[in-house]
Image: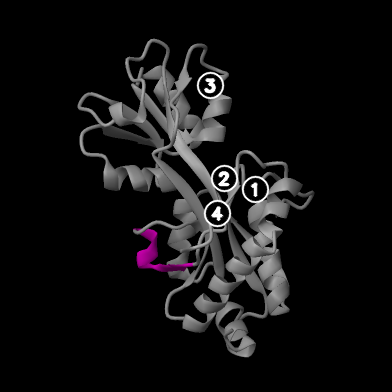
């Protein structure tokens, strides 16, 4: 294990652990307290890491993952709880994932699309939240379908409905809520990717990165991630990530 003094100097140079929190992920941030401080699995992980370091935790909220990722360049946080993606990894050092969420598609009533493998075709337009982890994955992996990017999860559903788009991409739990607002809509079986939630830290801090890596492994193997998922009643929607091979 890395020397704790060095780790604290790298991870919490201001005497506290500033935890970047993505407010748009309603599975990881389930509510806020009376002072507006985020509550959920993601804040719990931040508090647990701060406790191991022996420093107080301060939640730093961001309205979406893109804004959180951008703040890595401005010293906006000490750790950022965000999905690991290759584009983000250019500026952020990621830990192994501690939990994951299935991403899939919904199609409107009467759609000829019956499986995920039929989505990436010319003429299919996919509504997607701009700069979400699944948007980044689709950008890298789709070849024929067109991505229609909007600024929020709710807006992606509205665009899907109003413009008669062929497909809506999203996290399965969010799609299940939206399906209730569109009679006859179908959520496709399986997933095109699993969005893995990780802890990011600033690059160039190897001792800090090694400590965070080991911390995530301990959180998974001790059952603390599973306990947080159960405590915030998101079991069945969030899953504990598999240990890295």
Q: Residue at x 38, y 64 (%)?
A: 89
Residue 15, position as x, y percentages in the image: 67, 80
Q: CA distance from mark 4 to mark 1?
A: 17 Å
Residue 90 inside the magenta-drawn segment: yes
Q: Which residue is mark 4?
A: 241
Give SS at disc 2: loop
Q: Which residue is mark 3?
A: 179
Mark number, residue 29: 1
Give SS at disc 1: loop
Q: Is residue 192 left or right of residue 229?
A: left
Of the image marks 4 and 2, the number of the one nearer the N terminus: 2
Q: Residue at x 38, y 10 (%)?
A: 110
Q: Residue at x 52, y 83 (%)?
A: 207
Mark number, residue 152: none
Circle 4 or circle 2, nearest the eye: 4
Q: Is residue 54 left or right of residue 168?
A: right
Give SS at disc 4: loop
Of the image marks 2 and 3, the number of the one nearer the N terminus: 2
> Label 2 neighbourhood size at 10 Å, few (<14), some (14-19), many (20+)?
some
Q: Is residue 168 visible?
A: yes
> Label 4 neighbourhood size at 10 Å, few (<14), some (14-19), many (20+)?
many
Relative depth, front residue between 56 and 134:
134
Whether label 4 touches label 3, CB < 8 Å: no
Relative depth, front residue between 42 and 64:
42
Residue 6 inside the magenta-drawn segment: no
Residue 92, position as x, y percentages in the image: 43, 67
């Amino acid at each position: 294990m890395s020397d704790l003094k060095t780790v604290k100097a790298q991870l919490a140079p201001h005497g506290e652990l500033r935890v970047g929190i993505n407010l748009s992920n309603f599975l990881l941030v389930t509510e806020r307290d009376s002072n507006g401080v985020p509550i959920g699995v993601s804040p719990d992980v931040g508090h647990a890491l701060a406790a191991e370091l022996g420093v107080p935790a301060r939640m730093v909220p961001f309205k979406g993952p893109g804004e959180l990722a951008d703040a890595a360049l401005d010293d906006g946080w000490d750790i950022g709880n965000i999905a690991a993606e290759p584009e983000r990894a250019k500026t952020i050092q990621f830990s192994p994932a501690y939990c994951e969420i299935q991403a899939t598609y919904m199609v409107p009533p009467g759609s000829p699309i019956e499986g995920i493998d039929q989505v990436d075709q010319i003429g299919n337009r996919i509504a997607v939240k701009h700069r979400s982890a699944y948007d980044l994955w689709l950008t890298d992996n789709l070849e024929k379908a067109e991505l229609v990017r909007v600024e929020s999860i709710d807006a992606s559903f509205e665009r899907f409905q109003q413009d008669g788009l062929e497909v809506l991409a999203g996290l399965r739990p969010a799609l299940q809520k939206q399906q209730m607002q569109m009679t006859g809509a179908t959520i496709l079986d399986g997933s095109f990717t699993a969005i893995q939630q990780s802890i990011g830290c600033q690059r160039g801090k190897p001792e800090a990165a090694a400590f965070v890596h080991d911390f995530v492994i301990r959180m998974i193997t001790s059952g603390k991630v599973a306990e947080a998922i159960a405590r915030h009643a998101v079991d069945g929607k969030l899953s504990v990530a598999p240990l890295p091979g």
